[in-house]
Amino acid sequence: MTAPPTGQEPRIEVGLLDGVAELALRLEGAFRAADGSRAGPGELRLQAGGPGLPDGAELRLEPEEPGRAAFALEATIGIDFHWQQRELQRFQGGLRVLARRGRLTLVNTVPLETYLRSVIGSEMNAASPPALARAHAIISRSWLLAQLAGRGAQARAAAGMLDEPGELRRWTDRQAHADFDVCADDHCQRYQGLSRVAPAAAEAIAATRGVVLTHGGAACDARFSKCCGGVSEDFRTAWGDEPVPYLVPVRDQAGPAGPLPGLETEPGLRAFLSAPPAAYCAQAEPHILARVLNSYDLGTRDFFRWRVRLPADEAGRLVRERVGRDLGRLLALEPLARGPSGRLHRLRLRGERGELVLGKELLIRRALSDSHLLSSAFAVDAEGPAARPEAFVLRGAGWGHGVGLCQIGAAVMACQGHAHEAILAHYYPGTALARCYP
């Protein structure tokens, strides 16, 4: 561990709900507002423009007994993804309600280490091996501190967009929240309340308190996804075009790194799909998955290699509804550019009414599914006549953007006895550990 910078544990503002017309909360204990008035225990219902909440107003409530009081609400998790669902969630800490343009935003304010206790159990099962929990605690803390550090100077652009008749290129980074630090869902880090907190997660947080992954003396923007598929991806495939030295492609396997398998080419990717390497994330047996994944993630079993059949007329409907461009029935899906893990970041769609080039990886995944494709690392085969296919068969690898730590691969490494330091060194080359506050 390198000589650590010094500082204090920050307080984090987490957006639980954003842009809703009304809120229904259950206060489990007494809370006080800034003017001294008291709320709870019991139901609290708020409406945009209602009593005490005109446009531009803000309500702050702090628990009278911080260690005992909580509040509960129904929230949607996995928004727009295939595991989207509603669940009742409970949170501790303070809360802020902001009235903006006829809508309400609910923000939970908690110390960073308290926030992490829920994040670790929300991202991975609380029964995960200690090495995995510790590694995840460090990268979740690192990522968050990197976001906070970037809010003022904004080291990276929060979004990119190219919107032309023949090309649509979009990416949205995780810094684009004006009224709070981070959201509570997959766009940032999963934060699903007290039900996800368990002794194992609390131990991992305590054992790594204040420890972050660093590069060049700064906290790392430590991205992660569910499964890389055998090779992790470069930062530039999913987000901005500038290189990030520690978010680079890594073979997800033991031993010397060796050369990358050339997945930017169609022949290279097809060989990789048909004859997968002995990757860590390929070795996730059912008993490992049951130990490290939460129930809603366990429903997805084909994450390492997967197959989707997409009828041509259905593909045209998806593009029209999901992207807003009417190309008619699709006639071809033509890969134009891939990253080192095989993930597409430019794809040409040819239809009866025109053509469109899509990028980056998340927009491609969104355009060809009612939720999102598992990843953009897929090869395309047409069924039927070449000039007018009946359907497209997508054969793919991995789950998520693939950048940084592969959660399934890291879980296998932990189950094989690797320490958290070895896991982090594998997925984030050239980094070091440091303690940024006591």
Image (tube, grey):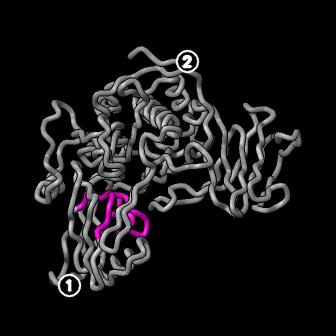
Would you say 309 lies left or right of 198 here? Answer: left
Confirm or deny contact between disc 1 and disc 2 (CB under 8 A). Answer: no
Residue 388, numbered label: 1
Q: In this view, does 265 lie above or below 384?
A: above
Of residue 64 and residue 358, the one placed in the foreground of this image is 358
Q: Which amino acid does label 2 sit on?
A: Pro
Q: Residue at x 59, y 22 (%)?
A: 8
Would residue 295 be counted in the magenta stretch?
no
Q: Residue at x 55, y 18 (%)?
A: 438
Of residue 56 and residue 437, the one placed in the foreground of this image is 56
The residue tagged with tag 1: helix, strand or loop?
loop
- Neighbourhood count class around disc 1 (C-alpha, 10 Å): few under 14, some 14–19, many 20 upward: some
Q: Can residue 30 be seen in this view?
A: no
Residue 438, numbered label: 2
In the image, which residues are magenta?
Answer: 357-378
Which of the marked residues, 1 or 2, is nearer the chain's N terminus?
Answer: 1
Would residue 377 be counted in the magenta stretch?
yes
Q: Distance between the residues labelled 1 and 2?
A: 64 Å
Q: Is residue 369 above or below residue 241?
A: below
Rendering coords of residue 318 (x, y %): 39, 75
- The quadrant of the image that shows the N terminus is top left
Rendering coords of residue 141 (x, y %): 49, 32
Would you say 264 lies left or right of 208 here? Answer: left
Q: Which residue is drawn at 58% across and 32% down?
A: 112
Rendering coords of residue 364 (x, y %): 33, 63
Quarter-wise, where is residue 246 in the image? top left
Residue 216, numbered label: none
